[in-house]
Amino acid sequence: MRDIFRTRRMWRRRGELKPRYDVVVIGGGSHGLATAYYLAKNHGITNVAVLEKSYIGSGAAGRNTTIIRANYRTPEGAEFYRSSVELYEHLSLDLDFNLLFSQQGHLTLAHSDRAMITMAERAEVNQLLGIDSRLVYNDETARLCPELNLSDDVTWPILGALYHPPGGIIRHDAVVWGLARGADRRGVEIHPYTEVTGIERSNGRVTGVKTTRGEIACDTVISATAGWSTLIGDMAGVPLPITTHILQAFVTEPLKPFLHVIIVSSQMHVYISQTDRGEFLIGAEIEPYTTYRGTSTFPFLEYSARHTLELFPQLESAKVLRQWTGLCDISPDYSPILGLTEVDGFLISCGWGTYGFKAAPIVGTTLAELVATGRTPQLIAPFTLERFYTDTLVSELAAAAVSH
Amino acid sequence: MTGLDFVSLDRAVAGDGFEPRLSSPLCRALEGSDRVLDLSFLGKIEVRGDVDAINGDLEVVRITPQRALVLCAPEEAAALRDRLPGMVIDMTAALAGLELHGVRTLRRLTDLDLDALPAVGRVADVPCLVLRNGDSFRLFFPQEYGHSVAEVVLDVLKGLE
Amino acid sequence: MTVDGVPNVRVCVEPVREGATVRAQNVLGSLDRDLLNVVDRIGGPFTPVGFYYRTMLRPRRLWPQYERVLRNLAGLGCLDKSGRRSGRYDVEHRRADVLVIGGGEAGVAAARAAAENSVGSVVLVDERAAPHIDGVETLAPARAIGFYEGGLVPVDAGNVLYRFRAGKVVVATGTVEQPLLFPGNDLVGVLLPQAVRRLVDDWALKPGDRGVIVSADGAGLDVVEQLRRAGVEIVEVVDLRESLPSTLAANGRRGRLESVTIEGRELACDLLVMSGGRQPAYSLLAQAGARVEYDARRGIFVPVDLPANVEAAGSVTETEPAAAPPPPSFDGGDAKGRCFVCICEDVTEKDVKRALAEGFDSLELAKRYTTVTMGPCQGRLCHLPSIRLYARETGSDEGAIGTTTARPPWAPVSLGLLAGRGLEPAKRTAIHHRHVELGATMMWTGAWRRPHSYGDAAGEARHVHEALGLIDVSTLGKLLVEGPDAAAFLELLYPNRFADMKVGRVRYGVLGSDAGRIMDDGTIGRIADDRFYVTTTSTGADTVIEWFDWWNAVWGMDVEVVNLTGALAAVNVAGPRSRELLGRLTDVDVSNEGIAYLDTKEAHVAGVPCLILRIGFVGELGYELHFASPYGEYLWDTLLERGKDLGIRPFGLEPQRILRLEKMHIIVGQDTDSESNVLEAGMPWIAKLDKDDFVGKWALEHVQARGFREQLVGFEMANGVVPAEGGQIVLDGRSAGRVTSARMSPHLGKAIGMAWVRPQLAVEDARIEIKVDGRLEAARVRLKPFFDPKGERLRA
């Protein structure tokens, strides 16, 4: 307890770049830092540099809606995210940093019978894998969330929901900081404000990276750059089937506890949770256009407000305080692309769409294992880049072009 | 029967005990209201091709350089279909329409620039063609959204009372 | 404070309304005896910044309890759990030639000048009451929310949200007075000059008896006269431009100011007016695209490089130095009070120093760690002071540190106002109201409202087999493809063959993506040599139309595509007695020779010109009638009336699903997903791989080459249990497929369904196990339709 009054540095001051590292991780977000952390912790690989073009956690890691869950549609996806939730459950203790993981439960609402089928499918897939996930009807939904408007007097009446008790929200910045501290203490170097401008190759393998602060030699480069993945991929000569879209979110002013479960409606493109700070954190579906421009739009606020009030009319007088935008790297099947590429020594973690933050610890452990052993762990084998050439997609889309 | 008679409103035949009758998609929503006029049965003929070749004293709304909508009285539609140039499709049944008054009302329904009409945009969240004559506006929109639009229009009018 | 149930109202600026109920918030008991104070009191040393991240870690199982306590302490106002929508909000879209934001001197002058130069319409928006100006429309009280894409400036005017797009926007938002940082700066009685002006001028209140003024600019000194007039005794005036005290602190008891200590001198007072200079309110300009730059001479951030069509007026942009930059914070000597950087978020100078020492050494990181600027004032009062502090503590300068992004909205705005009237458009068929009158349960399919059933889904389904049913299928997408290249166009779009189709015939088609995935299905009728009538699924219509238009543009063929979806209503008259009914209504020959299965013909039905398509989605003899939508109610009524003696009965979507499942007809999007192709979906005859080319051909060839990974099959349950749609086929404890459709067939008396299974299970009569409510239930695979496998009923 006394420790909390002592001021201890979280991480070392940024030093000079060394001429050579064993592993260079591009991207100081949750994935990059987790990979560096587990490289050091699980495999003793500590000659690692994490390069971040801005401050750590400045990208998707600091902009997401902080939801952690495992109730995916495909067995491959559900199994993978289940491992992630398990790691998240122990991550606070592991990092000795309270990430404020609030496993308050997660309700995905169904407003049409087609959606009910999708929910049932997810519940069935999840249960086979031992994931706590089930279809609930309005009587139970009313008990789980008495504040939710379950009446028929709305545009999209609620027919049922997929209930996932272990689903939760977490303090996203704390995840970044905890991982950064853990990696730093094990010898990993974190270099904020260091942008990668090129990737050096020779005979089909990586030999180094160029940065705004000089060149580095290395054998292994891991790109964990989410919305910017295609740009980094191009530097390595690896074209990626990724498009970048923006995703928007906003918070209200802090209010006393009101909502004790996470509410998602894909029909209405809205995610609603109340953080430990009391703010309502409300996010949307990705915007349909591709862009790197991170400006927030007003229509997003309008339709999100409209949809939020359909579910929670009590929020009518709550005020929006801040809105922001993040970049999402969308893959054709809404599943991630993870692991090796055709360029030796160039590894990727991308294609996360809106699911990246949930996967940080499991991406870290599996990529670290891949780097250390040279073998792709079974858990991420379905998510290789190769699948787009072998036609073995892992579709998280229920129906053509309809995300959930 | 030849061609696309099943698309038009004016090819029905009464007799043999049959009395075909039309009903407007707006009639229920507008029941009892005298503030808007139902234009759903107004003739709306789409022309594709050389729209410059359309001649005569007609109300022609250009949609694109190669597309136009010719508005006419219902009884003129048949003759027009025969004589208009290019590909001619009777869109009378596809588009519901209404006429209403007041700039303020329109401002609450659409973000179109009311000084740059006619234009196609969204009215009450529905794709719509808007025409203006002084303080009077005509709206044409997919008939399947007709009931929704009419409800919103009446709600807006009520709000401005 | 909470006013009329609306939480977090700043009562200092909210006009008083008669009958308004005002309650204090976020206190236990009353404000004077706030029990939460205890937390504050012990909080001094007890809750340093980042406290939560380091505590309550062990034991892990107790965290939920800790968390509950944390959550209850967080937040400000309370929501009314039984609150309803007030329905009082509306949106108005506005245009103006000049939009002036801010009704202070500069704003008024700008508006007046614009009006005098007759530039067109001029609108002035002000938070309080703005004066009347000839030729200017004034909106007040109203607040610009932000500056958004395309020059959109939404304005909050209470119950109406004005969405402005202006030719020119003049931003005259003035400046925000900045507080000084010294111990005790949170005490009641420590005020900014603006608050004094409001209390004295607007409310005629005397803010205290004995006042001390500490000011870095003229604004603080300006209130001296006002205070004197209000009867406040001025104890001391410190002009920081002339003398800089080495220490400054406010002392109080029970949260109220009692004295101020300046360089060791303790002055008894109950009012302290502080002014740390004025920061231009540049947020709107920054959102509009202006750059924000540090002006070291004045110690503030100023907007520069304004975008075209945006102007700044008045003090938001003035360049004269009016203040001396005050020190980032004052040493309080041995004062006990805490020195707040951010009042909203309870962040002290010590917290900020600690964050920097811990390594949160960039502005953005420190902001997130300490939460400075993240409270309801959106950084108006703490952004600049915190940057000054970072600069001093990190030994850099404010210019190098820069600002954080000026994120919208600029002013907090309620969800109610943003939501507006909140009506979502719904599509209704021309026959919609008849269904409602007949007591149908309506449901959503995409944007459409459709009848689920008329109360007896099983009975309705059985009736179609036994007698005669009528269903509204107006929601089908309907396209006309016309032109010399029409047949060639469809040949390229679909895997099917159309070139050999005779006029008057209909064919089932499945549309594929360029990756060979199933996009949609429907029927294609050739109604003339160069004219095809194409139907699509109800929810796929818009996508298919875009798809057609896209390829038409790519290939540049001589084809026109016309969307007739809304123009036409459609009904399906189905059942063994349908021919008899149709015969009563039309002159054309309706015999099996006159209109054979998969024929199409134009004819008058009950006097209405119709396109008749003889197809059989529901598995019985049936005719789809497509006709101009305004005849919908008439034809529906006539069919029911003339078919009464034949026992005609309307049926809804649910019975139709049962009927089509008996025939193993797929529903795209339910039985298929984004990866399904026609080969694995059991429809190899669709794909004419001998055609030169069609969209997705290479992908289907690849599927054929690689072999099947899963196949869509039918199944019949052994024990009559109906599994859930989405249920799992289980093999050795793992998923080996999934149920896509399942129903009890009242006609067959069996539980039937369709499922994707591993190829080794896609064999007639293969035994599979399906998980139902946690148990495994046995089923047999069926590859042929459950009902009328030879299609004799359809061809009858």
Image: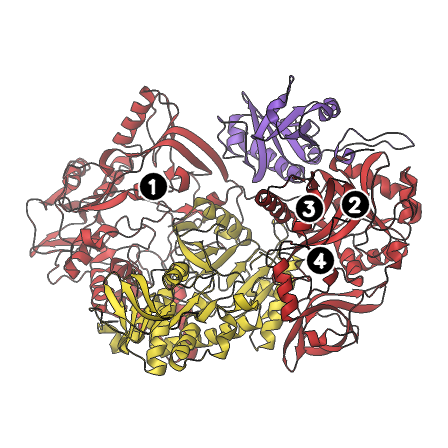
Task: Please report contact status of discs 4 and 2: CB closer than 8 Å, yes or no.
Answer: no
**Disc 2: host chain:** C
**Mark 1 or mark 3, earlier in chain:** 1
Residue C288: which numbered mark, if any? 1
Chain bearing tag 1 is C
Residue type, numbered disc 3? Ala
Cα distance in 3D space between marks 1 and 3: 51 Å
Would residue C570 be seen by someone viewing this image from the given angle? yes
- Horizontally, residue B146 falls left or right of residue C234, namely right
Colour assigned to chain C in the rendering is red
Q: Nearer the viewer, residue A116 or C675?
A: C675
Left or right for C572, reference C53? right
Which chain is disc 3 placed on? Answer: C
Left or right: C765, with A51 as reference point: right
The answer to which quarter of the image holds residue C295 is top left
Location of mark 2 (residue): C571
User: Residue B130 location in percent, x, y?
Assistant: 57, 30
Check disc 1 and give the amino acid type: Ala
Q: Which mark sits nearer the N-terminus, 2 or 3?
A: 3
Question: Which mark is first along the chain, 2 or 4?
Answer: 2
Near mark 4 (Cα within 10 A), the count class, few <14, some 14-19 or many ≥20, is some
Residue ID for mark 3 = C488
Q: Are marks 3 and 4 on the same chain?
A: yes
Against B131, is C677 above or below? below
Q: Which mark is residue C688?
A: 4
- Mark pair 2, 3: CA separation: 30 Å
The residue located at (66%, 44%) in the rendering is C427
In the image, what residue occupies the spot 39% across and 25% down? Answer: C121
Q: Provide the secondary structure element on which disc 2 rests.
A: strand
Q: Chain A in the picture: what colour?
A: yellow
Which tint is chain B?
Answer: purple
Q: Residues within 10 Å of mark 2 (few under 14, many from 20)?
A: many
